[in-house]
Amino acid sequence: MSYSLSFPLARISWSLPHRKVLFISSTLLFLSWAIPERVRAVDDPNTLCYQCHEDENLKDSLGRSLFLNQGEFDKSIHARSGVSCVSCHADLEKVKDFPHPEKLAKVNCGSCHGDADKSFQKSHHATAKQGPQIPGVNCSSCHGYHDVLEKTELRSKTNPLNLARTCGDCHFSRVNGRKGEGFVEGYMEGVHGMAVTKTGLINSATCVSCHGAHDIVRISDASSPVSRPHVPHTCGNCHSGMLRDYREGVHGQAFSQGIADVPVCTDCHGEHRILSPSDKRSAVYSTHVAMTCARCHENEQLTEKYKLPKGRLRTFQGTFHGLASAYGVAKVANCASCHGFHNIRPSSDPRSPINPANLPQTCGKCHGGASTRLAAVNIHVLDSKTTSYASYVVQNFYVLVITVILGSFLVYILADFKMRMQIRKSRSGVS
């Protein structure tokens, strides 16, 4: 008798006794139901991989875990985009026997992310050598392995809320020793880091805002956004108004002419540990401003090279403003109070707050109703004799009087001490 049977897995036609045909058909029907649960590679190309790699105890010959958390991978941008295991581990497509060889070719992210990989290969991270015990930097160092998420995801390692921690994985303790650690700690203490980590303001500056993302290069590299020639523009990406003021001022004008000695943002505000001007630790806090400006304006080489007025700090410190500032009075006038902050202009500029026509208004900010006469008083006086002979005489008269008074007190104390010693000596002789 001849039979023709149809099954999901095959079509079979041959001549067999009736009982054998029924047995074979029942067996094939069972297999067509049971086997696809184990070999559903057609429906899910990762199923075969999960069979081994979902074992938490699976390790390679060096004892490293080969466990793959399917739940984590399914949430990743790759899984949601239809990327399978063999999409990244491409050499597995040629493997026919399992378990597959332990050593597989390195994953090439550039096969999909060509532009990012091209930028990365030119970066400092691609060539950085961190030592034999520390693996080099690669895509997974920043993005993760099987749990890669878009940067908009709050759990993503590249989300602005997590970037400092991601960069800190290397820079906090393994790169440049204490210097690297100071970079991350300083950022976290600064206004930018506090804005991100404490208030969740993700449009505040992060590591990539200043250093770049895949194309990070050394500061000494002229193409780096944090190299000295690019600092004002990099900071100006966020602080555009301050950049405009800086460009209009004497410092910005000199900077645009290519003068390398002129201060840029980081010279006054710092690099990673940028603090608020109201923070007493800040270099631009009221009582610290004079010393910050003095780094350049008291530098003999710079004052000689650019013919700058000398003795700016000394002549300020000798005034009431300078003395009060030295004692910690924050409300007293400092350099920026009179000269301005970012848009510092020469006194000859009609827009300068220290232009003679504007001085009454400038002084009037603290001294209400300041007259032209008060505003005309010189602050930075190196030689009071030639500037104002009358004040020179008064000043020296007071110095003379104070010296005589203090000297008289000293003579009196010494004479009294000598007399007391003689009395004590005579009394001890009588007894």
Image: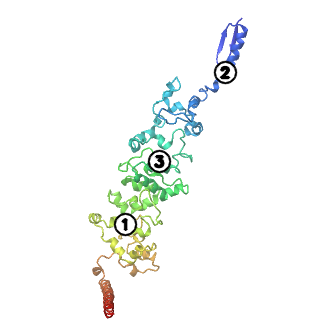
**Relative to 280, is 317 on the left or the right?**
left
Q: Percent x, y for residue 326?
A: 40, 73
Quote the CA–CA distance across marks 3 and 1. Answer: 36 Å
**Relative to 285, is 296 on the left or the right?**
left
- Residues 233 and 77: in front is 77
Disc number lying in front (3 or 1): 3
Quote the CA–CA distance across marks 2 and 1. Answer: 83 Å
Q: Which residue is mark 3?
A: 169
Quote the CA–CA distance across marks 3 and 2. Answer: 51 Å
Q: Percent x, y for residue 265?
A: 40, 59
Disc number lying in front (2 or 1): 2
Sooner in the amino-acid sequence: mark 3 or mark 2:
2
Please tell me how crowded label 1 is: few (under 14), some (14-19), or many (20+) other residues with Cα within 10 Å.
some
Would you identify the image quadrant in which residue 376 lies? bottom left
Q: Which residue is mark 2?
A: 32
What colour scheme has been applied to the protein in the rendered image? rainbow
Sooner in the amino-acid sequence: mark 3 or mark 1:
3
Q: Which element carries disc 3, helix, strand or loop? A: helix
Kindly identify the amino acid type of the residue bearing the numbered disc 1: Cys
Looking at the image, which residue is at 40% across and 55% down? 231
Q: Which residue is mark 1?
A: 293
Q: Which element carries disc 1, helix, strand or loop? A: helix
Find the residue positioned furthest to the front. Answer: 431
Looking at the image, which residue is at 64% across and 25% down? 36
Looking at the image, which residue is at 41% across and 46% down? 216
Q: Which element carries disc 2, helix, strand or loop? A: helix
Relative to 395, say whether 87 is above or below: above
Quadrant of the snapshot with the N terminus: top right
Would you identify the image quadrant in which residue 319 lies? bottom left
